[in-house]
């Protein structure tokens, strides 16, 4: 071999030196020394982070620490080397560790950021692994709590909560409630006595409440989310309306009333009833009057008026009845169903020399005539505006105006009224 000599990693070698003279004599120089060759790095250290404090939390090779608190955490390394063996492990800010187990500990404020742990073998080869220390001294951000502001029906309150985000992650949240007595529409002062409650929460009658949520991260920081909203629960019904009247007209019932003086009065609800028909809500509002124009003449209607507060409580109903009528249009009665062309009949109007009768179907005028008598017999077909019209199955509306003076003057009085009928097959 030549010198220097290259030996494969993981091998051992011994050397001897042979010297010969010119007549064949030889001397061998030998040594008991053994050369051990190791050019391979030790195994990359496997790191384990550990903590026993509520103010620190490990996530893989990162540890979050609340440096506003006092505590410690540990770092352990596992490594090996098949050739020259592990000589030492170097931890940041610490003396080299030469004996198993390779481990050390740190106070919360000792390190920050990315740190390296390096293993060295007997030949000086080395390999490193990293871990990270991240201080976290702030509570979760970006969260919120929201719930109704004002009266709720039945006392059931659903609170919407957003936890927000945090470096070390969210650990827990607690919903709390502070209550006060509701007197009329005014809340007594809140006492600041917060109690844990479920979500949704159910409040007793005549109560005011406000809510907050406490959100904690994994290293002991906490954020409290609040809202200016105040929930009110009122189970007392308001007084009924007074002075209610119902005045019938032509396809019209006019209702009027006086609202109750309750401070939490919110609205008046009107339900209309008629024989052999389902009740219908026709009004819901805070006014003092209502004109019902979706009625049929000659039909008796009953109206129930109830006052309501913001919590949905309602008074006993006040009942009014009315039958809309037209003093001029006689037959067919409003809403009638006919099977043949009807006789349209109305009462004479003083001063009328003739009349204008118009017939409409689906919003389109299909007949306009000017009889001198206060009646007109429809036919099954006729001509109008150059087209043949037919009295087919459907819904029709007819109007009558009084003509004043000579027809050539084209002078009409106020509409006598309108009525509807339905033609069946």
Image: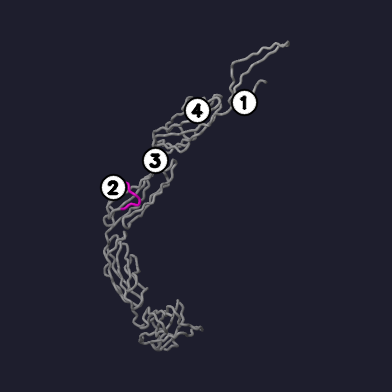
- Which residue matches tag 2? 191
Question: Crowding near pointer 1: few (<14 within 10 Å), some, many (20+)?
Answer: few
- Which residue matches tag 1? 8
Question: Crowding near pointer 3: few (<14 within 10 Å), some, many (20+)?
Answer: many
- The secondary structure type at the circle numbered 1 is loop
Q: Are marks 1 and 4 in contact (CB under 8 Å)?
A: no
Q: How far apart are marks 2 and 3 (CA)?
A: 26 Å
Q: Does the magenta stretch include residue 335?
A: no
- The secondary structure type at the circle numbered 2 is loop
- Which residue matches tag 4? 90
- Which residue matches tag 3? 221
Magenta residues, start to end: 192-202
- Closest to the camera, between mark 2 and mark 4, is 4
The front one of 163 and 141 is 163
- Closest to the camera, between mark 2 and mark 3, is 3
Q: How far apart are marks 1 and 3 (CA)?
A: 57 Å
């Amino acid at each position: 071999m030549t010198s220097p000599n290259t030996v494969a990693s993981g091998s051992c070698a011994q050397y001897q030196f042979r010297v010969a003279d010119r007549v064949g004599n030889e001397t061998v120089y030998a040594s008991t020394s053994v050369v051990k060759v190791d050019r391979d790095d030790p195994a990359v250290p496997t790191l384990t982070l550990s903590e026993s404090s509520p103010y620190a939390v490990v996530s893989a090779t990162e540890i979050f620490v609340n440096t506003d608190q006092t505590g410690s955490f540990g770092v352990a390394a596992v490594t090996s080397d098949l050739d020259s063996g592990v000589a030492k492990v170097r931890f940041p800010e610490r003396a080299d560790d030469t004996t198993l187990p390779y481990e050390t500990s740190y106070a919360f404020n000792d390190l920050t950021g990315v740190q390296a742990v390096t293993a060295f073998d007997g030949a000086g080869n080395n390999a490193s692994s990293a871990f990270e220390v991240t201080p976290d001294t702030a509570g979760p951000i970006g969260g919120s709590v929201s719930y109704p502001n004002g009266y709720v029906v039945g006392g059931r309150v659903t609170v919407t909560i957003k936890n927000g985000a945090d470096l070390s992650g969210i650990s827990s949240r607690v919903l709390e409630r502070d209550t006060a007595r509701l007197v009329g529409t005014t809340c007594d002062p809140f006492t600041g006595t917060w109690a844990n409650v479920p979500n949704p929460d159910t409040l007793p009658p005549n109560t005011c409440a406000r809510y907050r949520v406490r959100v904690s991260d994994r290293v002991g920081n906490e954020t409290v989310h609040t809202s200016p909203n105040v929930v009110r629960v009122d189970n007392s019904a308001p007084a009924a309306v007074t002075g209610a009247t119902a005045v019938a007209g032509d396809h019209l019932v006019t209702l009027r009333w006086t609202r109750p003086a309750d401070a939490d009065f919110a609205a008046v609800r009107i339900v209309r009833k008629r024989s052999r028909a389902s009740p219908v809500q026709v009004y819901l509002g805070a006014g003092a009057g209502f004109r019902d124009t979706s009625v049929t003449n000659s039909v008796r209607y009953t109206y129930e008026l109830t006052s309501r507060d913001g919590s949905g409580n309602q008074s006993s109903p006040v009942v009014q009845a009315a039958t809309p009528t037209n003093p001029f249009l006689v037959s067919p009665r409003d809403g009638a169903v006919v099977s043949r062309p009807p006789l349209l009949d109305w009462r004479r109007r003083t001063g009328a020399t003739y009349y204008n009768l118009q017939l409409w179907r689906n919003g389109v005028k299909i007949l306009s005539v000017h009889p001198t008598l206060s009646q007109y017999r429809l036919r099954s077909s006729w001509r109008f505006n150059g087209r043949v019209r037919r009295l087919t199955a459907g819904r029709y509306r007819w109007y009558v105006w009084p003509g004043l003076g000579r027809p050539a003057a084209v002078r009409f009085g106020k509409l006598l009224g309108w009525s509807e009928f339905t033609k069946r097959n």
